[in-house]
Image (tube, helix red, strand yellow):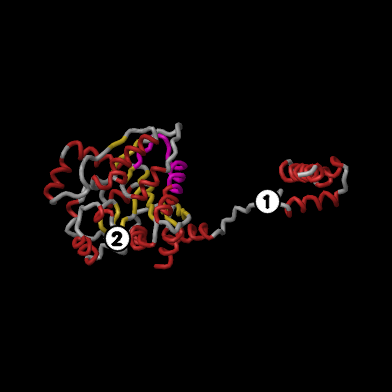
Amino acid sequence: MNNFAEERRQLLESIAQMYYIEGMSQADIAAKVSMSRANISKLLKTCVDEHIVEFKINSTSSPRTSLELMLQEKYNLKKAIVAPSDSHGELSKNNVGLYAAEYLISTIKSGMLIGVAWGTTLYYVINNLKPKNTIQADVIQMVGGISPKSADTDGQNLAQKMAETLNGKCNIMQLPMLVQSKLLRDLLLEEPFVSKHFKLFNDIDIAVVGLGSNRAESSAVYKSGYITREETESILELGAIGNICGHNIDINGNPCATNLSDKVISIELNQLKKIDTVIGVASGFEKTQAALASLRGSYIDVLIVDENLAHSILNAE
């Protein structure tokens, strides 16, 4: 850049700084740099034309914001947040996790008890949580463990990692999510340490849950080896299109009785509804029915999904 061009650039930047940052009038700038007001007006236009000054409008009518408002109104939500979608499914999940983590950090206060379920999207939520030294909140695992195959996304590991980030104590549940019989489940729930853990569910301030699909290609319960493909298909035939905290629900959000109903070790759906703020996270078209069921059943207060799923939910209605 020659001297003339450099001096011209510096003049333009100086005028832009005085007008847009310092709030000086064009007349005051003209007097300061010994130019006419008309010349200052032309130079300010040049600043825009040459991208020395660029404008950004934070519009509330952007496509994702419109989706958020429609979801909030239709399902009477406290908040709906729509994250960008990506052609790669895992990147969409990470986007949802990032947005959910930011919302959580802005909402959690010291002294709170945070409930955590399990799942891949929750893994991304907690992986994106940034430590904040001013927060000290405890965490509690709400659903029994899945399987060693899914260690990273298991409720126990997620609860422990979240508690470390929030500088709090972790209450873990060293039990599987599904057991062999109702009798075994009932006996386990009578154990003093298990009973004490379940009573703490009544003290949860904020819960974070995934919205699970029961279709084999998307079912974490099936992929973890807890149930066979035949059992998955049987559950679907009974109308249980999705699950929340391990409990099967139909398309309208009603609890759906299956051969697994009495074998689940998890927070009960009626307990979940009593929590002040339940955040549901999901991404991808394949979660449409599960998300609809959770919304219609009024299990969640805050919905955080990717753009594709947001469109799919509203189109399905």
Q: Nearer the viewer, residue 121 or 150?
A: 150
The reply to whether residue 216 is in sight is yes
Helix, strand or loop at label 1? It is loop
Q: Please give the name of the residue rendered at 49% of the width and 58% of the height, measured from the top-left corner.
A: 69
The reply to whether residue 15 is in sight is no
Point out residue 304 in the picture as x, y percentages from the top left corner: 42, 53
Q: Quadrant of the C terminus?
A: bottom left
Farthest residue, direction front: 2
**Three-letter amino acid code at disc 2?**
Glu
Point out residue 33 in the picture as x, y percentages from the top left corner: 85, 41
Q: Is residue 54 left or right of residue 161?
A: right
Q: Please give the name of the residue rendered at 26% of the width and 54% of the height, measured from the top-left corner.
A: 223
**Label 1: which residue?**
54
Helix, strand or loop at label 2? It is loop
Magenta run includes residue 112: yes
Point out residue 152 in the picture as x, y percentages from the top left corner: 31, 44
Dot 1, crowdedness within 10 Å: few (<14), some or many (≥20)?
Answer: few
